[in-house]
Amino acid sequence: MVIKPRVRGFVCVTSHPEGCAAHIQQQIDYVKSKGSIKDGPKNVLVIGSSTGFGLASRIAAAFGAGSKTIGVFFERPSEEDRLGTAGWYNTIAFTEKARAEGLYARNFNGDAFANETKEQVIAAIKEDLGQVDLVVYSLASPRRPHPDTGTVHKSVLKPVGQTYSNRTVDTDRGVVSDISIDPASEAEIADTIAVMGGDDWERWMNALNDADVLADGATTVAYTYIGPEVTWDIYKNGTIGLAKKDLEAACKRIDALMKTKGYGRALISVNKALVSQASSAIPVVPLYISILYKLMKAKGTHEACIEQMQRLFADRLYSGEALDLDEAGRIRVDDWEMQDDIQAGVKEIWPQVTTENLEALTDIAGYREEFLKMFGFGLPGIDYEADTEPHRPMI
């Protein structure tokens, strides 16, 4: 079939296998261009490995440090005459390219929240690797079936305590408008924390510890975002922000476990605002990202997921130097985003943006380009008019 992008709201419901493979190759080429990561991780488990920061982490580890990797994800497989998700095609492409270079890569497509998935992954670690020395937790899901109760929790992106009003942009139509979002209920707050908080990360680390598959000096890292004040009411101080506070609380408990058992440490990395399936769903954030991209590209400091993760691995986690942490003990690779001149530029441009001047004042074109690349569209060298076989079995 000929595959074209079909965008509905904040998601593209089609994905292009060859385009996804080309996007993976771009990221691999970037990592290789930066040279090897000395003393990098040897055996890596990435929970949430098929898109975004998790996928970039897996690529950085494998092609930067020669790591053996196990990826856990939940994606819709392709079938005859039915497209798989971008994450499905991403993982196939990654695995093909890793194995072509003699790198171990094993995949688990299933519910990462489930006890059964944890047991299957642990069995694979014992069978193939013995132990892992890095665990990346980069899971982003709108819902979570609780492994103990079976209750399905669904997350919401809402403010807490009061109605939130601000400007946003429909990235598909290019329309800037005002929005108001009612505050979350207590039940919605609790559900969001259950889905996006630290409970599952902690369960993974406890399970890995109990199974004795964490290597001496093992590290685990999860990802978060803080952002500027303009986004705080819907992000940092909203339901998702409360979930991230729960993640940080879990990090402290996991870190205590790691130190008690003689491993390394648990860390949280604060990453840059980037186009992702998750960020696209958050009101206000796409407009902020469009402004941010214009300013950072002009300054020469713009990074996408792979640049962020390569820098995190090479210049932070495995630099051989003591980690420079913020007052809350977090790694900051959002440092270039949060520079005073960049944020001053955002504050200046923000109130000026209208539907009419959106293209001139922001990098909405760059936003759209990055958005479509996530689904394998807009990559050079791909004939998007050609027939493409949609069914690609996992390898």
Image (tube, helix red, strand yellow):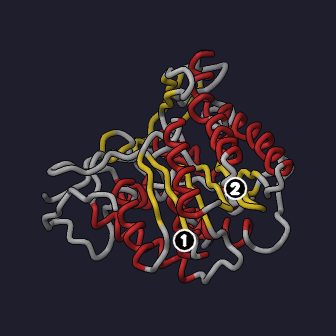
Within-10-Å neighbours for mark 1: few <14, some 14–19, many 20+: many
Judge depth for marks 1 and 2 and give the one in front. Answer: 2
| Residue sticking out furthest to the front | 127
Q: Secondary structure at mark 1?
A: helix
Q: Secondary structure at mark 2?
A: strand
The N terminus - image quarter: bottom left
Q: CA distance from mark 1 to mark 2?
A: 19 Å
Residue 118 in view, yes or no: yes
Say if 263 sits above or below 316 in the image: above
Across the whole image, how many numbered discs are drawn on residues? 2
Give the left or right position of residue 316, taking residue 49 as reference: right
Q: Residue at x 14, y 59 (%)?
A: 2
Whether the residues at callouts 1 and 2 have beta carbons within 8 Å, the answer is no
Task: Report the residue marked by disc 2.
Answer: 214
Residue 227 in view, yes or no: no
Residue 16 vs residue 318, the one in the foreground: 318
Type of amino acid under label 1: Ala
| Residue 306 position within the rendered picture, expressed as x and y whole percent measured from the top left | 54, 66
Say if 164 sits above or below 263 in the image: above
Within-10-Å neighbours for mark 2: few <14, some 14–19, many 20+: many
Give the left or right position of residue 249, taking residue 242 as reference: right
| Residue 207 position within the rendered picture, expressed as x and y whole percent measured from the top left | 65, 42
Disc number placed over residue 62 in the picture, else none:
1
| Residue 133 position within the rendered picture, expressed as x and y whole percent measured from the top left | 68, 62
Q: Residue at x 36, y 44 (%)?
A: 11
